[in-house]
Each structure stands twice: as structure tokens, then as C-alpha cells.
Amino acid sequence: MEKAINEKSDLKLTQCPVSPQVQSKTKKFFLKITGLLFVGLAILGVILPILPTTPFLLVAAACFAKSSPRLQKKLLANKTFGPLIHEWQQHRSIPRKAKRIALLTIILSVVWSAYLLKDAMLTAIVFALVIGPFIFLWRLPISK
């Protein structure tokens, strides 16, 4: 009994007991599920003003690029969001209108949160949470 346990513990830590083909299929499956989850969040972002749509679609496009060319083509073929995703993938830029809407939404969300919270510490936390994304969006180039 002890000998069997010792034989099993002699496996090298660098070896994975799962074959590379199974790893690849599992990785693709999880990337596809993650992509679909982010498309769902993007759809919610269209309906709910507090959720951003574009970042979720960009993450979904990245997941589909590595897992499902068919779903990636469907996402890029979308007449509303396809050009936005394509522009981001090619030039790392966003349209002026999208940038303005995103920045304005962040500002209005912070102001509205400050009004509702009426606590300086909570408002500071909200501000700290949005300053990074705000600066990132501010510095993004505008597509032509």
C-alpha cells in the first residue's frame, strides 16, 4: 500500500496528467463560454446605462479569436458593433462619439453617486474606482 502511494507521488510536477489535446479543447470551451458571457454582459450594457458595452464586446472578440472563428465572424459582421471592434483591433482607437459618451457617462455616474451616497468617503471610493478607466479612455486615440 505504501509502495503504491510512493509510486504515485514520484510524478514530476512539470508533467500534466491531461493530454495537450484535451487541454486545448478545454481551453477553447472555456474561452467560448467566457466570450458568450461577455456578449451577454454587452447586451445588458445596451439596456442598462451603468454597464459599458464596448469593453465587453472587445473581450468577447478576443475570446472568440482564440476559440471560435465562426462566433468571431458573427460578432465582426454585426452592423452596429462590428466596425467598432474592427477599428479597435486594427488601430487601437475608438470613434469620437463613443469616447465622448463613455467619458460623459463616467462623469455623470460619479456625480449621481456622490448625490445619492452623501458620504465623502464613499464618494472618494467611487472616484478612485473610475479614475483609471477614465484616464485610459481619455488617452485613447480617436479613429478616423
Image (spheres, helix red, strand yellow):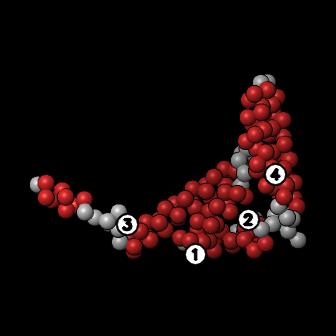
In front: mark 2 or mark 4? 4
Badge 4 vs badge 3, beta-carbon distance below 8 Å: no
Give the residue type that dot 3 points to. Thr
Give the residue type that dot 1 points to. Pro
Front residue of 114 and 131: 131
Other-residue count near label 3 (Cα within 10 Å), few / some / many at <14 / 14–19 / ≥20: few
The span from disc 2 to disc 4 (Cα, nearest Å) is 23 Å
- Element on which disc 4 rests: helix
Q: Residue at x 81, y 34 (%)?
A: 112
Front residue of 11 and 90: 11
Question: Can you tell which quarter of the image residue 73 is in?
Answer: bottom right
Which residue does the numbered mark 3 point to in the structure image? 14
In front: mark 1 or mark 2? 1
Which residue does the numbered mark 1 point to in the structure image? 69
Image coordinates for residue 22, horizontal then vertical, percent: 38, 70
- Element on which disc 2 rests: loop
Image coordinates for residue 6, horizontal then vertical, percent: 19, 58
Q: Residue at x 88, y 71 (%)?
A: 144
Question: Can you tell which quarter of the image residue 82 is in?
Answer: bottom right
The span from disc 4 to disc 1 (Cα, nearest Å) is 32 Å
Which residue does the numbered mark 2 point to in the structure image? 81
Q: Residue at x 76, y 44 (%)?
A: 130
Image coordinates for residue 139, horizontal then vertical, percent: 84, 58
Badge 3 vs badge 1, beta-carbon distance below 8 Å: no
The span from disc 3 to disc 2 (Cα, nearest Å) is 42 Å
Image coordinates for residue 120, horizontal then vertical, percent: 79, 26
The span from disc 3 to disc 1 (Cα, nearest Å) is 31 Å
Mark closer to the chain start, 1 or 2: 1
Mark closer to the chain start, 4 or 1: 1
Label total for image: 4
Which residue does the numbered mark 4 point to in the structure image? 135
